[in-house]
Amino acid sequence: MVKTSVLFVCTGNICRSPTAEAVFRHIVEQKGVGARFHIDSAGTHGYHIGDAPDSRAIAVAARRGVNMAGLQARKVQKEDFERFDHVFAMDAGHFRHLQDVCGVTEKNRAVLAMFDDEDVPDPYYGSMADFERVYDIVEQGCEKLLSQICAARAKDL
């Protein structure tokens, strides 16, 4: 079985993108299609390489039944655009970075888009309410994303 690979990208890979990775993984597992996906996350910068997600992101996810254990920050690599079918930037700045620094062009195999066509705000300097808001945005976007991917795959069959 060919897996669909999805990569979520934010700045340091400790708040938004690991939340999206964990939420999307949870959703596909709940829908019984987890084996069909390879899901990962990365940061545009290497500020936190090897670190676990922010403790506030972990707490919000845990309250919602989503496990973020084992996730570690990493920096996005140029090779990711060959390895992943879909690459989602959490905001317009990440999108530009992926285009400028990583040399992403329309000819790359990966599909680049801002997550759910709008910026996911950075909660890092905010409150728990900001982390809750990000979780809500990410969860809604991940549900939509799965529907879009499944619809596209059905067309290809």
Image (spheres, helix red, strand yellow):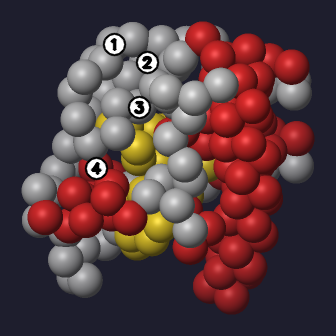
Q: Secondary structure at mark 4?
A: helix
Where residue 123 sits: x, y (%)? 56, 34
Residue 146 appears in the figure: no
The tag earlier along the polypeptide, 4 or 2, is 2
Where residue 119 sits: x, y (%)? 52, 61
Q: What is the spatial separation of the Cα atoms under label 1 and label 2, in whole angstroms? A: 5 Å
Where does label 1 land, which residue?
A: 50
Q: What is the spatial separation of the Cα atoms under label 4 and label 2, in whole angstroms? A: 16 Å
Q: Which mark is residue 72?
A: 2
Q: What is the spatial separation of the Cα atoms under label 1 and label 4, in whole angstroms? A: 17 Å
The residue drawn where x is 45% and y is 70% is 113
Q: Amino acid at mark 2?
A: Gln
The tag earlier along the polypeptide, 1 or 2, is 1
The tag earlier along the polypeptide, 1 or 4, is 1
Q: Amino acid at mark 1?
A: Gly
The tag earlier along the polypeptide, 1 or 3, is 3
Where does label 4 land, which residue?
A: 80
